[in-house]
Structure formats: structure tokens, C-alpha cells
Image: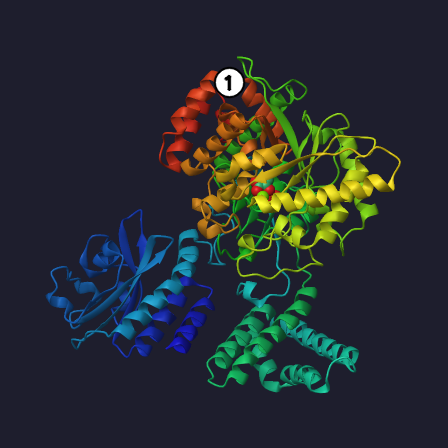
Amino acid sequence: MLTTLRRIVLAFSQEPDLEQGLLRLVSQVKEAMATECCSVYLADYEQEHFLLTASDGLSKTSLGQVAIGFSEGLVGLVGQREEPINIANAQSHPRFKHSPEVQEDDFNAFLGTPIIHQRKVVGIISVQQKQARQFDDTEEAFLVTLAAQLATAISHAEAKGISNPNISQNKWQKLQGIPGSSGLAIGRFYVSYPRSQLSSINLTKHDQPAQQIKRFQQSVLLTIRDFGQMSHRMRGTIPDDTLDIFDMYKHMLESASLGEEITEKINEGWCAESALKLVIDQYIVQFQSVDDPYIRERATDIKDLGNRVLFHLQETDHSKPEVPDDMVLVAQEVTAALLAEYQHKGLKAIVSLSGSTNSHAVILARALGIPAIMGVGNIPLNNLSNKQVIIDGYSGEIFLSPEASLLKEYQHLVKEEEELQDVVREVTDLPTITKDGKSIELLLNAGLSGGIDHSMKNGAVGIGLYRTEIPFMERPCFPSEVEQVSWYKTVLQSFPRQAVVMRTLDVGGDKALPYFPISEDNPFLGWRGIRITLDHPEIFLVQVRAMLKANIGIGNLEIMLPMISSITEVDDAIRLINQAYFEVSSETEEQVLKPKIGIMLEVPSVIFQLSELAKKVDFFSVGSNDLTQYLLAVDRNNSRVAGIYDSYHPAVLRALNHIAEHAQKELIELSLCGELAGDPGGALLLLAMGYDKLSMNSHNIPRIKWVLRHIDYEQAKLILSHCLMLSTTKQVHNYINDQLELLGLGGFVRAGK
Ligand code: PEP
Ligand code: MG
């Protein structure tokens, strides 16, 4: 059953056109279930009906013509109940709807199941036959599993309507993603393709087969050459029988059949990459369906082989567009590294098909002040290439090939944004003080990109978070103490008379060091932050010694410990910091200062040990990014659960308020350095809670300063007390947005002034 299912899904995914794919699928399902009819109806929410889109068994002329209302017939009932319906004799069911045009009068048995994507019914798949039959559990399970696998593909292809490569260049379309970094941009899509992954190839036709065959043959020759070189290089270092793998690969490539099949596909009109994918995918499924585990394993080999040929094909693809001046970077997954690569090339915005609101790529995009939209879903990247696009980072909307009127409207809004940005710059050098005299410090989050020049300070009164892991990531191995001293000195000197909070190495989770790989099932719940550095005192001690040495003669260093979840970790870390202090003091004549030590509050357990912790350290800094993730048990990088990752969740707000009340009672300094600090509504609430300092990216400092200088502290407290009584995230968002509008500050949370 599993093999049949895989085959059907593969065949469906290989059809570039949704309707053709569904037509092929219904025939295969009909055959696999030994029945007489299989049909797929797709939901149309505007018309509130299911449209018969594909069928093998019902009248061909009714395809695309017959619609069943959401509350009509058995198909409607499956949609309403959101569960399978299995009836031996459908005609006698009270909900049976007679539709003469589909010619189903003879059918009695009916099994229908909804196709649901992210809680939304996107279609119905049904099987029918003349003879009364109760489909058994296995058959029902088969259809349910198939529907679940189809859901994502159908939803993306259908709802977004851009799966059809023939779609007109000029037809404008809207895509919806998750708003990552606010702001507006108008530009042209530049696609960054993941290298050499057949799975990411979108099937495309080509009208010059001879040229494609030549490219393919050249790539095969280059791949065979690679295998020869690899095998030669490794001879003597690995056993000869292992080297046989290269011969096997070469043999597979040279075998006439593989090459012939691919050539045949090219002659059918596919480009070389698509032909390669079609043939390799077919082989993978065949290998995977064999009982013998050795043969099954070969599926991995054939996939690897395909990717290697693809690598050379991509090398010979000279049709890559130039990077446009007004580039909107789009990729399957925009990482912080990819963003860093393109940031100097006039980058206007980023769009990532996967990923979520608080990935480090998004944090970097906010720091650069460019809009980012994440988790757009499985869209064929090559259909986006070079298209003009409007990016609304507030709403997560992407307008492709926009109409002139929409373009004009957004050009106007972009202008207003620029004006607003100019206005907020006026307060850069003024103190952050509310209209009724309450002051708060705004600090800089640094370390994500390059050095810290004057323009980056933007009126910050110190550094509230220096993420030391970023320079560690950009190297081929752990840095030496001397190297670290020089980095840290530069950072400390950038604010010589103000505090600079340096966080000790916080790797793990989504931040990996290339030379220190960690592979875990649950990286965010695993070996992260302080857990790693306490297990590796040699790394921790070198880092702390370097910080202490860099601080000699400057004296503004404060050390912060990430991912603290227990008192023991604090004790152990302080012991090591003291050891480093005594070592450095004994090695120099100069005065070594003992820095203030603080901890990040980002693991929920610490919320219940605030009093004990306050006695051990000098300051607390809330990491709201991780605190939200851990309090709500929702991965901050996963687009599937992005809708529930939200720092405005009432539980998060109440936790933040609880922390502030306790910090005030314990008389311990409190700051917040997560992304919430740079959010206008978030900053207002944190001020009202009594946070002493907010640390954020450079771009947000003047914006937040402007917001806080235009409100009353007393009013902020009233807004906070109302928010703390609300019970849903949505209520908090609506209320905060309304209040900001009333205060004339709506331009900070939506497009336009
Ligand atoms: C946080 O978790 O809020 C934080 C500031 O640290 P990071 O985003 O680097 O995990
Ligand atoms: Mg964190």
C-alpha cells in the first residue's frame, strides 16, 4: 500500500499542471482501490462551493462545470464534518444530491475524505462504485493518508495560482507570508537557488532539445571525471571495497538506459534538469519499493548521483539573470549568511519560502531596516524570477507584477515611510523620556553584522547585547584568546563611557559553528548556550579571559550568561569567571576590573527563582525571543507554527510583568534585549511595566525613541493594565494597534504615515 501511495504522490508531483496532475491521480487511485470512480473537488471559498475538477468515472463534460455548495450533498457533508464518510448505499442517504449532469446514477458505494491544509478544507476526494460496498479500514486509511499528502501540494498550487508556468507575465497576483521585518519595498525578485538539490527543481519545459542533450552529456562526463578523481584521491586511505562505490556510480552513469531515459524526456520537451529529476525520482521510488534492504539503500545512491549531475548542469546554466539594482532576494530558506552575502548589493527586501518570525535572518533584516516576509510556502521559485514585486512587511503581503494603480499607491506609501524615517531621525540625539517625564535607556543590540560605526549608534546609550557567537561563526575554527581580545577591545571602545554587555558564547539551537557540529533531534531543547560552555570550560575561560583583558584601561564591560535554567549553572559560571579574573590579574601589572555579571531570563524556570537569582548576579536581561519560544512551546523558526509564536500572547505579557515586579522588589537592574523591545507596542508595554532598559537593533532606536517621547507614562500604564486583563493574543494586538492609532503613532505598525 505504501509503495502504491508513494508512486501516486510522486506521479502527481511530477505534473507541472494541477489539473493534469489530478486527472492522473484519480485514475491511479481508482485502479489502486479496485473501484469504478474517483473524483477530486476543489474548494472555492468565494463561491462557497466545491468544484468538480478531476474524475475518472463521472461525466468528462462536467469537469470544471459542476459545483456542489458547501452545505450540499455528500461532498458538502464531508467538508462540513471535516472527516471521512463511508457509506455502502449512498443513494438512500438523506444528504445524497441528485446531479444528472455528472451521470452518477448507478453509483451506490461512496467513500469521501476531506483534503485539509492548515485547518482549512481545500478539497474533497471521493471514490464510488455501483455495487454496494462498505470500504474497509485499510482502504479508508489509504484515502485519508493520500489526502493528507495532497493537501500541501494542492493548497499551494491552487490557492496561490502560480503553479502554472504558462501564467501571464502581466497578470498580478497576491501571495501571503508571515510578516518578519516591517517596512515596504518595491523591487524585482532575484532568486537564490539552493545548489544541486533535485528536490528543489521545478519542472520546466524547453524548446531546444539538442542544446539540452548537449548540456546533459557534458554534465555526465564531468561527473564521471569527478568520480575518477575522488577514487584516485582516496585510494590508500579508505578500503578498496568502499572505493567500489565510485565504480558503481560511474557504471550507473555510463549505463545506456539511464542516459537514454533522460534523453527521451528531453526530447519530450523537458529541460535537462527536469528530465534528470523525472527519471531519478522514478528510480528512487522503484528502489524504495523493493523488500531487500540492500537494494532499498541504493535509493540514496541514485539520489546522490542525480544531485551530482545536477551540480554540473547548474554550472552550465548561463541563463542566470543579473542581480537587479532593486533586488528583492527570494530563496527556499533565507539564512543570516545568505542575507549577509547580498546585503551590499542594493538589497531592498527578503522573502523566504520557509522559516519564521524570529529566525536570525529576520533579526538581521530588522537590523538592516529592510522588510522580510517568511514562510510563504512551496512556490516554484523559477516562476518568481525577475518579476516586479511589492513587499508589505507589515501585513506579510507580496504583490506580484502589480497593476499600475496598486504600484502608484505603494510608491506613495514608500515615500511616506521615508518621510517618517527622516522625522524620527530628528530625535536621535535627544534623551528617551515620555511627555510626562519618565525616562528609560535605549541600548544597541550588536554583533549580528560588521563593526559598530557612529551611524550605527543612532543615539544608543550603550550596548545591551553583544552576540559574541556571530564572529565565532565567521571563522574556520575557534578563535584564539589574542584574536578575541582584539575584537572585544574594538567593541568596548565603540562606547568608551557607556556600559557594553557582552554575552558569552550562545551557540546551539539555530546557531551552529561550522567547525563544531552538533546534531540533535531537538536542538532548541538540547545543548545550547551556557550548557555548552560549562561543559567546555576551555572555551568559556578563554573567552572570559579575552573579555577581561580587552576591558583593561576601558572599564565598561559587563558579562551576560545565556540560556540559564538553574542556580547551579550561575554558580558554576561565576566560579569560572572568578578563576579567569584571578588568572588575568596575576598575569599583568595593570588593573583588571571585576565586571558586573548578569543573566538572560529566557528559560521559563528562572521566572520562579528570581529572588535567589537576584542575590547572585548584578542584572537581569530578558531574552523575549527565547522566552516566548519556551513559554509557548513553539519553535521560533518553524513556519508551520508561526501563527502561535507571538510575544503579545497574554501568558508572555503576564510573565514579563511578573519579572518586572520582582526585579523592582529585589532592586535589581532589568533590561529586555529580545525583538519585543524594538516593537512600538512592545516598548510601550515594557516601559509601563517598569523595565529600566530596552536593547534593540540600530534601525529601531530612533523609531522607538520617537514613540516613547510621544506618549505619557501614566497612559501607558493604563494601556498595560487593560492588556493584562485580555485573554487572547488577537485581542492584545487589536487593542495595542487601536491605541497607537489614537496616539497618532499608527504609521509605526502599518504601511503609510
Ligand atoms: C532572545 O532570546 O531574546 C535573545 C535576545 O537572544 P537570541 O535571539 O540571540 O537567542
Ligand atoms: Mg536567546
- Percent of width and height locating residue 528: 60, 52
Relative horizontal placement of residue 61, taking residue 547 as reference (left or right): left
- Amino acid under disc 1: Ile
Give the secondary structure at mark 1: loop
Above or below, 503 against 281 in this view is: above
Q: Is residue 674 above or below residue 82?
A: above
* Rendered image quadrant of residue 17: bottom left
Mark 1 lies on residue: 711
Relative height, residue 290 to residue 335 (above, below) = below
Residue sitting farthest toward the right: 589
**Image coordinates for residue 243, horizontal then vertical, percent:** 71, 83
Horizontal arrangement in the rendering, residue 134 relative to residue 530 (left or right): left
Mark 1 Cβ and ligand 1 under 8 Å apart: no
Residue 173 image offset from top left, x and y in percent: 46, 46
Horizontal side, residue 513 vs residue 123: left or right: right
394 or 434: nearer the eye?
Answer: 434
For image coordinates 54% across by 71% down, the residue present is: 269
Residue at 76 percent across and 32 percent down: it is 453
Q: Residue furthest top?
A: 436
Residue 752 visible, this angle = no
Task: Give the image location of residue 166, x and y in percent.
Answer: 48, 58
